[in-house]
Amino acid sequence: MKLIVGLGNPTSKYRGTYHNLGFMVLDELSSRLNVKIKVKECKALTATLTRSGDLVVLAKPQTFMNLSGECVKQLAKKYGAYPEDILVVFDDADIPLGKLRLRTEGSGGTHNGVKNIISELNSQNFKRLRVGMKVPELENRAVDIRDFVLSKIQFEDREILDEAIKRAASAVMDYIDGVDIEKIKLHLNG
């Protein structure tokens, strides 16, 4: 069983924002898998499929970012997923724009959505794929992080992030298809 969760904020107001990079990766992934993420359950939109003998659930929480854990906990319970069966994809302002980082466990760092998942699952033992969105304006504090993550992706960042979204979707496809997680980590984090 593999539960793949892309983090973001629901409603059209947030479409195309930096904070919705997790949703964008899931959209790319669902396109490659030829499924639609549209079933409403457990405070999420989901799609289910069987691949390489495993049940795979793709989920986009509809709880807003800071309450993502409510959805993840309900989905885990419904589908019998343990924390180690979960892979969460999300934006990360601590990683340079377009860079990807894969970890198999750890803290929530500065990401409130991930902190909420850890709190709700009472575990840090889930995989996370972080899509970098750190830009110079964040480093030199020229813009507030909360305003930035909810802003539309700037034209000059779009090409870099489009490529990162494709690479992230490819990494998740490898994971779904049974490629060893350490091999994927080495490729992405190297």
Image (cartoon, grey):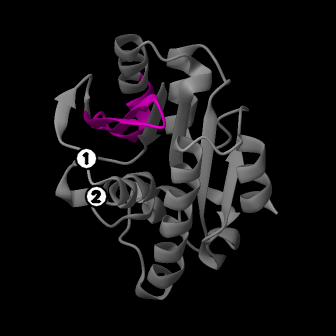
Query: For mark 2, what is the residue?
Result: 14
Relative height, residue 77 to residue 45 (above, below): above
Decide: is 72 above or below 127. above
Tell me the amino acid under the disc marked 1: Pro
Position of the C terminus by quadrant: bottom right
Residue visible at 27% across and 36% down in the picture:
46
Q: Which of these two is toward me, 81 or 23?
A: 81
- Give x and y (percent) for residue 122: 59, 13
In percent of width and height, residue 21 lies at 44, 59
Mark 2 residue type: Tyr
| Residue 151 tag number | none
Q: Which residue is mark 1?
A: 10
Tag 1 and tag 2, C-beta contact below 8 Å: yes
Asked whether 155 falls inside the magenta stretch, the response is no
Outermost residue toward the bottom in this view? 156
Does 147 appear above or below 128?
below
Q: Residue at x 42, y 25 (%)?
A: 72
Give the image location of residue 156, x and y in percent.
48, 88
Q: Residue 16, image x and y in percent?
A: 32, 67
Farthest front residue in view = 53
Q: Residue at the spot x=44%, y=80% of the render? A: 158
Which stretch did the figure color magenta? 45-69
The part of the image, by quadrant, that contains residue 101 is bottom right
Q: CA distance from mark 1 to mark 2?
A: 7 Å
The image quarter containing residue 32 is bottom left
Looking at the picture, tell me which residue is in the foreground, 102 or 123. Answer: 102
Q: Is residue 112 above or below residue 54?
A: below
Secondary element at image label 2: helix
